[in-house]
Amino acid sequence: MVRQGDLTEGKWNAYLRAPPVFRRIVEHAKVKPLDSIAEVFRGPTTGCDEFFILSQDTVDEWKIEPRFLTSCVSSPRKVKKFMTEKEKIQDYLFTADEPLNDLRVTNALKYIQHGERLEVEPRKGFHREKRKVPELETLKARQLWYSLPKFRVAPILLVKMMDKRPKAIWNRARAHASNLFYYIIPKRRGDKLPLLGFLNSSLGAFLSELYGRSYGGGVLELAAYELKQMPVIDCSMLSKKEGIRIADAFRAFVKADEERLKVEDGLDAIRPRSKKERGLFEAESQRELGKVIKAEEKARTTLDEAVYDALGLSRGERRHVEEGLRELQELRRLRTKT
């Protein structure tokens, strides 16, 4: 028998599934819960994505003024890389927050009036019959139904639902994101890149598997409270050399991933052509793809080693992390099949 007050705080399920190296990690002086070094919250819940998240075509159709629009990453599928790029973002949040009288002679007002007539079917709740947008539960509570709460831009966007591994995105475009992402805002400005490196490392993936839960299709999800509790490297405890090394390794990994995507796009571009052309060019592209995949794997290993070295993990402990990660991922996949 153990008194409850004597138990170690944290998600108890992690202790049942984790290899012995887990305790060494969570008790390390350079490791803290994420919410102790960063602000963490989910992307904005609009209450009606059909109205608030706009494609470029919708913006052009209604000629909505730029001051009422904020660039938005609407889906993880629209960010292939580990960083956002302003020129690649094609969606917007509608962010008008002025009374209707102040919006006269604007196209934003015309779009709001369209929204007042628009009927949608709620995605949640007991009552699923179609309703006009301003009558939706989330929107009725707002003083201005068409006005979204204001959010700070996050330098890190973490994909909420994960397939193979966690994906923490460097938000270089300073865009907002939908509620399919978590916003992570480090408390110290210089912690952004080392924290991104940790979250995208094998150790970050291992801890995400332990703290998250599996859903249909083998998808891993971290609830907000689980993400906040998850142990991460405390960048303030790193030496200048350690922080720079992890940041540089992350940058190199981003570049290697970008090269792989470029070759994959080139390979896709030649596939629809005739069999003769495919035979001539595809073999060369496949060889090039093999090279960039190996380069990406090497870059990830370099990132992993920078994180392991910062925590002083032994070769055996590193092996236990990587074996544990593979076992947890396989267990998640097996749950999908049963």
Image (spheres, grey):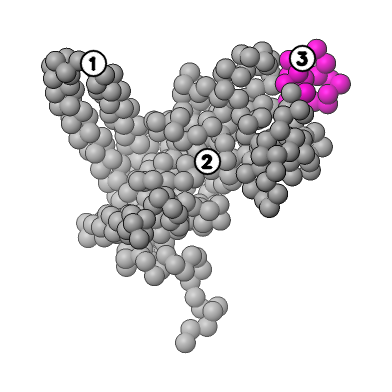
Q: Earlier in the sequence, mark 2 or mark 3?
A: 3
Image point 47% across, 69% down: which residue?
12
- Three-letter code, disc 2: Phe
- Quarter holding the C terminus is bottom left
Q: Position of residue 161 (x, y in %)?
A: 46, 46
Residue 181, numbered label: 2
- Three-letter code, disc 1: Arg
> What kind of element bears circle 1?
loop
The majority secondary structure of the magenta stretch comes to helix
Q: Position of residue 247 (x, y in %)?
A: 38, 37
Image depth: mark 2 or mark 1 in front: 1
Q: CA distance from mark 3 to mark 1?
A: 48 Å
Q: In this view of the protein, which residue sits in the foreground, 96 or 31?
A: 96
Q: Are marks 3 and 1 in contact (CB under 8 Å)?
A: no
Residue that label 3 marks = 106
Is residue 62 shown left or right of residue 242?
Answer: right
Q: In this view of the protein, which residue sits in the foreground, 194 or 156?
A: 156
Image point 38% across, 43% down: which residue?
200
Residue that label 1 marks = 273
> What kind of element bears circle 3?
loop
Residue furthest bottom in the image: 1
Image point 51% across, 78% down: which residue?
6
